[in-house]
Image (tube, rainbow, N blue to C red):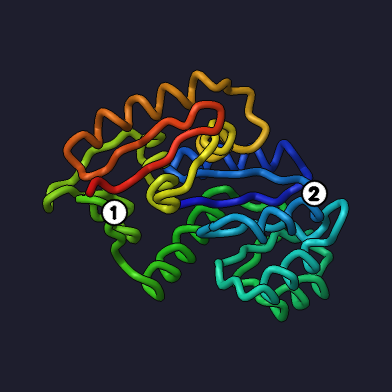
Amino acid sequence: MRIVVIEDNLALAKAVATSLMDEGHGVDVIDNGSEASLFLSQEQLDLVILDINLPGKSGIDVLAEFRAGGASTPVILLTARSDTKDRVAGLDKGADDYLVKPFDMAELLARVRALLRRSSLEQTLETRVGDLVFDQVGRRVYQAGAPLDLPRREFALLELFAGRVGQVISKEQILDHLYGTGSDSDAAAAELYVHRLRKRLVDCGLTIKTFRGLGYCMEENP
């Protein structure tokens, strides 16, 4: 799943992002409300973790704009203990859940799992791409009924491509998805994971094409 963490406390944001990536999710990190609004208007996401107190634009305003645009993506608010009115306002604006800082990371991960399960059940349980079937609830991928065993980052990369079949994805977008926004990983890491994933997809009805200077595009074989 693709999750964005919108939090201006970078130490906390990185801790949350690392915990989510350890569970196999692709994570972006944003520390500014105005940038978050733009990001949310352009990207397809499975869950948003949103701090209320942000520079540039408040989390409440970011959430209100997000919902006004018709987005139904689950949102977890992060709030300070004294912000009762903000928590109420956030829930009224369309938040699905909230956590009060400081919180236990295990509790956040449990709430993330619960919201993703609920969201998956409300939508489709399976996604088909080429000869592969994604089990969105179990977070597994199958080929001809047999599980395709993928390491965590290769699974996250396949999930990224599968959600954008026919679209060119840059190396920077791949690195942001695998390691979080602002990571110090270089383009070679993106090339390595694309190379490994290509080898896995030889008999799966899918091809990852290279567009020099632009990035990569997954296409279904005719």
Specify the farthest residue to the bottom: 92
Categorize mark 1 by other alpha carbons within 10 Å: few (<14), some (14-19), many (20+). some
Q: Residue 98 — which label?
A: none
Q: Position of residue 44 (x, y in %)?
A: 54, 57
In percent of width and height, residue 39 lies at 68, 53
Residue farthest along the right direction in this orientation: 56
- In the rendered structure, find residue 129 and report the number of the disc placed on it: 1
**Which is more N-terminal, label 1 or label 2?**
2
Q: Residue at x 57, y 48 (%)?
A: 105
Q: Residue at x 17, y 48 (%)?
A: 143
Q: Position of residue 7 (x, y in %)?
A: 73, 49
What amino acid is found at the position of numbered circle 1 in the picture? Val
Q: Is residue 86 left or right of residue 204?
A: right
Q: Is residue 204 above or below residue 115?
A: above
Q: Secondary structure at mark 1?
A: strand
Q: In the image, which disc is placed on residue 32?
A: 2
Please state which amino acid type lies under the numbered disc 2. Asn
Tell me where residue 85 appears, x and y as whole percent.
82, 75
Q: Quadrant of residue 154?
A: top left
Image marks 2 and 1: residues in contact by CB distance under 8 Å = no
Cα distance between the residues tagged 2 and 1: 35 Å
Q: Residue at x 64, y 49 (%)?
A: 5
**The quadrant where residue 137 appears:** bottom left
* Element class at badge 2: loop
Q: Nearest the camera: 146 or 17?
A: 146
Say whether residue 176 is left or right of residue 26. Answer: right
For this view, does 141 lie left or right of residue 152? left
Pick whichever, 210 or 95, lies toward us: 210
Of circles 2 and 1, the one toward us is 1
Label 2: how many Cα within 10 Å (few below 14, some 14–19, many 20+): some
